[in-house]
Amino acid sequence: MKKIWLPVVTLFILFRISGVALPPNDKIWDIAPGEKYVWLAYGNGEVRAGYDLRGALRRYDRQTREWRTFTIQDIFGTDFNARVRAVETDGSSTVWVGLSPKGSDILPWACAVSHDNGDTWTSFSTTDGLSSNNVTCIEVDSVTKAIYVGHYFNIPGSISRSTNGGVSWSVLSPNDTDGVCAIQARGGTVWAGSYFYDSYGGGEILFKSTNSGDSWEYFDSSDTPSIHNNSDIDDICMVSPSEVHCAFYTEFSANSSSGGYVYTTDGGASWNTQDVERYDEYAQSITVDGGGRVWIALRWADSHSIYLTDDNGSSWQGFAYPSPLPYVDPFVIRYDSRADIVWAGFSNPSFNNFTTGWCWTSDGGVSWHTDPPPAMEFTAADPAGWNLYQ
């Protein structure tokens, strides 16, 4: 037995040391396309086949088409049991990661930042001024450079904000519900979505600030029938400060003709609601591509599908497992403007029946690929970015 297991153990150790990508049965929690790299927050919560990396981060190099793996040890300098739940990049060499616990573990850190694409890291926790070490989402305002960290089950203080790169933090309390799971910000306009509408007697589910979170405007069922008791705004995509698209879940959707997708094009003055697929309205993630098409990932639906609309939800085109989607249970979907592709990450709860991982499409969902996207080459003629070539 010892002789049989020795090569396996040795191979696993080499994988961890070298940073070579491990087999594709990883739960993908978040995706952040950057200028030169694409970042994936992932983790194998079930410790399948021994591939528990204590939560992890992957970096895809657009030029070399190679992956590098970062462990909790790599990022925080010590090993502990947690998942990297959120990842965000400012588009250049700065990347932020946020942690959430596995089970009831108490985490020593909340988030970390690297300003050199992962070579070195600085960590932050409640002792640095954040309101919680349980992070659900991270957003960097591309204009003001303010950092917003959303927290789960933290009342008050569902958002921590830093305007100086993490040197100091302010605690924001836009809501009195269970926490914040989605944040988008641009030019000081901030949109945030909440968990569990009235678990603590709260009345708001969606929030907007035009002064970087110093004060908030609230939206609930009086503004749109879709936002009602026990709704979750699971994800937000801000096309502009006035155009915002939201994916949400409500436990009442099976008894209602509304659910799944809500959007505004006038800063919240009016709202529009569309079904994604009736009775399957656990809309987990949303993104809008360069052509204005809206993509929504549905979890727990019979087909475990990704849906696409080019008419703001009046009609939908679905993509399901096993064809053309290679995996079940999409958890995150993000438009990559640099490569003009859509990334999808999956988080199937049962590794015994399905593998899970990431894929991408460049043809409107006709085909989905699990191999690295085409390489991108930096040229002197395009000093600000990378050009796509086959």
Image (spheres, rainbow, N blue to C red):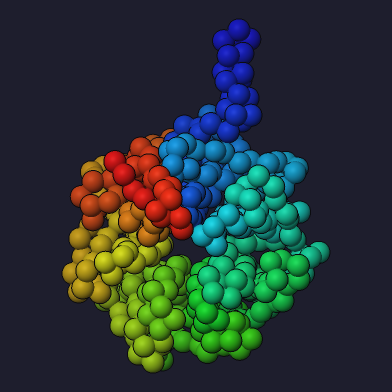
In the displayed structure image, the side of residue 339 where residue 204 appears, left or right: right
Q: Report how many numbered discs are placed on residues in the image.
A: 0
x and y percentages locating residue 372 in the rendered image: 38, 40
- Residue found at x 57% / y 64%: 138
Residue 154 showing in the rendered view? yes
- Residue found at x 31% / y 65%: 290
In front of the other: 337 or 249: 337
x and y percentages locating residue 277 in the rendered image: 25, 65
In this rendering, the answer to whether 77 lies above or below 196 is above
Quadrant position of the N terminus in the picture: top right
In this rendering, the answer to whether 227 lies above or below 319 is below
x and y percentages locating residue 3 in the rendered image: 60, 7
Residue 136, quarter of the rendered image: bottom right
In the displayed structure image, the side of residue 389 where residue 197 appears, left or right: right
In front of the other: 69 or 218: 69
Quadrant position of the C terminus in the picture: top left
In the displayed structure image, the side of residue 269 where residue 155 appears, left or right: right
Residue found at the very far right of the displayed protein:
127
